[in-house]
Image (cartoon, grey):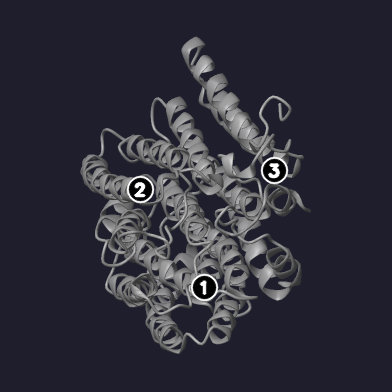
Amino acid sequence: MTALLPGLPPALPILGGGIALLMLCIAWHRSETRAILIALTTLVLAFASLWLPVLPWPGDPTGMLFVPDGWFTYIAALMLLSSAASVIMAWREAGTPADEFYLLLLLGTLGALVMAGSMDMVIFFLGLETLSLSLLGLIAYHRTQPTADEAAIKYLILAGLSSAILLFGLALSYADSGSLRFAAPSRSGSESPALPLAATALVLTGLFFKLSAVPFHTWLPDVMEGAPIPVASFIAVTSKIALFSALARYFAGADLLRPDAVGAELAIVAMLSMFGGNLLALGQVNLKRLLAGSSIAHVGYLLLALLSPGPFGMASAAFYLAAYAAATSGAFAAMRGASGLSDIGAWRGMFHRRPALALAMVVMLVSLAGIPPAIGFFAKTYIVIAGVSARRIVLLGALVASSIIGLYYYLNVVRAMMEPVPEVPRAVRGTTANAALITALAIVTVLAGLFPETLVRQTRSLLQPTPILHEAGLGPVAAHDMLYRE
């Protein structure tokens, strides 16, 4: 497979083959069991293929469309595992018929991987739209729920608007540089300095819409509330990882420590997202909306890591993405295990009804809050170290202050679960596969927090997101060595 497709990560054609196979099976005979088996098998094979050798690109590396570097391998592994968690959550939850639900999940995962490894504007935009259109179908999949239609319409309008803004920015970037490389345009050699600045601002605006960073965040709570639980998890985890990875690769060749308009915009959005996300979640009575606000705040924390280039910057971001993915997926899986209870009031007395499920939810919330011994504590500390090394004092103050706000609403859910109830209703249990998923994520969240050394070594050894090669001053031989060294 790799011999026929030089420079292309094997995970992409494997996902494409799994999608084609599932389409053929749907046309032949519908079966949710077979659909979920094909989806999980495809994701597992794609995960295993990430460490297969990729045939070098024949010729100048600047002509490559994908970058199979260490950053892509790590990010793709996180997205494939998160998508597999969404598939497991969807078992007996997807609706009727369910086959196309898993097909759309695989399509969205394919688009996310294309975005994460893209080095070309056109390929990146195709991956982004594949992900967006898949999400649109997934959000509206439960046709009998009025909230699903409302959420899908809101997502359709804002996704179309943000894609148009992003595409306009990419067009301006091409007009300035004459290149389709997916990278922030340089203003040093530009005839009109305003053109690359406008291009970068528009691309950032489009990506911030997709990331739901403040002040482009208003759609996320409504969409996640109306979407099924597996889809809400997919939006909050897989799509966020893909979009942050693309943002990191876009600025891989830029000096974000330089005081300019782009750095200031990123810093302002980071600070607004930290406070805005936590304040949004503060008054929520719905767990999905609470986790939406939490997701927005975590985007702000990740932007702080992005703005702290150096020995800890992107390594801390990679570690934080793993911690965020495990805890957020686990929280949604616990919600699914409670028969889809999303109202915080319905979780009152959960320690008396379902002590194991309540304990797992506590582990996830404690990790998201950054409380030891869960992995979220070390992840947030790692970002603080990166911020200190880059002297981001104001942003560090915002992180500490906003995290204190976050403690209230996370622990408020824990308090509700510990309240005694006079009458204990009959417990409703989820599927065995979902229970196994919750157990595995809870164990990983605790053990990785107690023993983070392995993951720290993995993130520190990553290649940083590869910058545009000809602007980095690399010739074909040096660039080839950088891309394919182990």
Q: Distance between the residues labelled 2 and 1?
A: 25 Å
Per the image, label 2 sits on a secondary structure element best described as helix
Per the image, label 1 sits on a secondary structure element best described as helix
Could you tell me which residue is drawn at 52 percent across and 56 percent down? 249
Could you tell me which residue is drawn at 31 percent across and 50 percent down? 172
Foreground pick, 366 / 474:
474
- Residue 258 place in picture, x, y as percent: 45, 77
Q: Which amino acid does label 1 sit on?
A: Ala
Point out which mark residue 305 bears: 1
Which quadrant of the figure contains the N terminus? top right
Instruction: Identify the residue under disc 3.
Output: 50
Could you tell me which residue is drawn at 41 percent across and 42 percent down? 128
Foreground pick, 395 / 165:
165
Foreground pick, 144 / 480:
480
Is residue 55 in view from this perspective?
Answer: yes
- Residue 85 place in picture, x, y as percent: 56, 47
Earlier in the chain: of badge 2 and badge 1, it is: 2
Q: Which amino acid does label 2 sit on?
A: Leu
Q: In this view, does 434 lie to the left or right of 9?
A: left
